[in-house]
Amino acid sequence: MADSTKTAKLTIDGKDYELPIHSPTAGPDVIDIRKLYAQAGVFTYDPGFTSTASCDSTITYIDGGKGELLHRGYPIDQLAEKSHYLEVCYLLLYGELPSPAQLEDFESRVTNHTMIHEQMMYLFRGYRRDAHPMAIMVGVVGALSAFYHDSTDISDPWQREVASIRMIAKLPTIAAMAYKYSIGQPFVYPRNDLDYASNFLRMCFAVPAADYEVNPILSRAMDRIFTLHADHEQNASTSTVRLASSSGANPFACIAAGIACLWGPAHGGANQACLEMLQEIGTPDRIPEYIARAKDKDDPFRLMGFGHRVYKNFDPRAKVMKQSADEVLDLLGVEDNPTLQVAKELEKAALADPYFTDKKLFPNVDFYSGIILEAMGFPTSMFTPIFALSRTVGWISQWKEMISDPQLKIGRPRQLYHGETLRDYVDIENR
Ligand code: ACO
């Protein structure tokens, strides 16, 4: 962290404290309060981290006001249009776009790790058939640490690298197996002559009884979904991965923690919740009823796929996703898909309503992704696992950055305690 020249002054009970201010390459200045407790004996209070920078990072930058998302400086719309997922993975992990030779080497390293230990098949069979694939993902990804002992020592850079490549390579295999298991079909082994997205589609939709041709337009759309979800700076699941790894936990366990956090409907589970909501609405004439419910303070219902902690303008990923939805549905000949019609009308109605515009609630990435995935043939329960496999590279890049930081400390927030103060234990017969 560069030395700061600016400072902030904090006065507590008439005493002044000077706090350094760090100026980032982009984004607001950050007041450094690390020494505040030692110097002034006070904590700061910021549940939900709405004003707290939890780390110093060089990976991803979001300007929520402008609706801008940059990976290592490159805007997401350029990456979604001109690049592809594995190249974006390289960029996130190593900081620069690869040369042709570097990309070839990286793709071959990922491709060589797509299979999982054969013994892991038995783990899947231990789950109920109706288990949610995210429940399987949390367990199986955590269990990778029981199978790949040679890449769990986080103090060894070589082991960190191998663990990273293994997870990027194996997550699609695990997600596809979770799906196949849930529908009672045999697992389909990865094919290393296919690109990352085509291989995933084949592992999900091929059966041994028939040939399976991957449609290049669907494969491109799948790759774009992976790319759009690859990283998103210090969101809840990424912060979970960072917090878990701050204790020195092994990388597979940390990514499993990230998957658990992603599952929630306020985060990665929103794509499933959004499609289910659009299907429940069913026809455009019911939109006003749902808009009214979303605005009603006494109704806990929220418009899924709307709003974002950071974006107070259009989520730049939603724009690309909307365009992809049109392309995919057009290709599949379902451009009059009723769910897409409801989505488009709902977006229009919400953006014309001051409740949403005043609160700066715009469609987020999840608003259109579910429509594409459903049209491709995925059940809603697979939406969040697909998000998880796409985000794995972001979690790993942030984890690697954190582990290599010489200032690494275990994450240990403080609290504002409002409970009972010291009191004596009361015997049960006297209560
Ligand atoms: N529908 C209706 N009202 C909403 C919505 C919504 N989707 N989102 C926020 N609001 C309202 C809140 O009720 C609140 O109103 P108030 O100020 O009158 O109390 C105000 O907007 C601010 O909302 P907060 O919950 O304080 O905003 P926060 O930044 O904490 O939440 C979140 C962001 C969780 C994403 C929220 O907008 C939400 O629940 N959206 C729906 C779920 C969703 O789509 N999540 C996906 C996020 S993207 C991702 O994880 C990939």
Image (spheres, grey):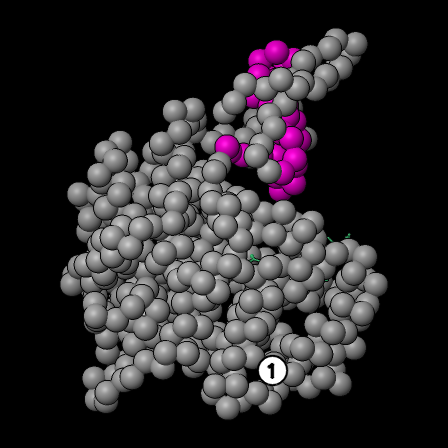
Outermost residue, right direction?
Answer: 354
* The quadrant where residue 297 appears: bottom right
Examine the rendered structure and indicate whether residue 305 appears above or below residue 339.
above
User: How far from the left and from the top, in percent, is residue 2?
Assistant: 52, 22
Which quarter of the figure has residue 125?
bottom left
Residue drawn at the location 77% of the way across and 62% of the way down: 356
The residue depicted at 55 percent of the width and 69 percent of the height is 321
Q: In this view, does 153 lie above or below 14?
A: below
User: Residue at the spot x=44%, y=56% of the render?
Assistant: 230
Residue 101 seen by the camera: yes
Residue, x 40% and y 43% (percent of image)?
95
Residue 371 appears in view: no
**Residue 409 forms part of the magenta stretch:** no
What residue range appears in magenta?
27-56
**Element type at mark 1:** helix
Quadrant containing ligand 1 reads: bottom right
| 408 to the left or right of 334 | left
Q: In this view, does 333 lie to the left or right of 348?
A: left
Across and down, in percent, residue 225 comes to: 46, 66
Front residue (pair 14, 320): 320
Taken as a whole, is the magenta stretch helix, strand or loop? loop
Task: Indicate left or right for 131 with 49 as reference.
Answer: left
Q: In which quarter of the image is the C terminus?
A: top right
Which residue is under mark 1?
339
Amino acid at the residue labelled 1: Thr
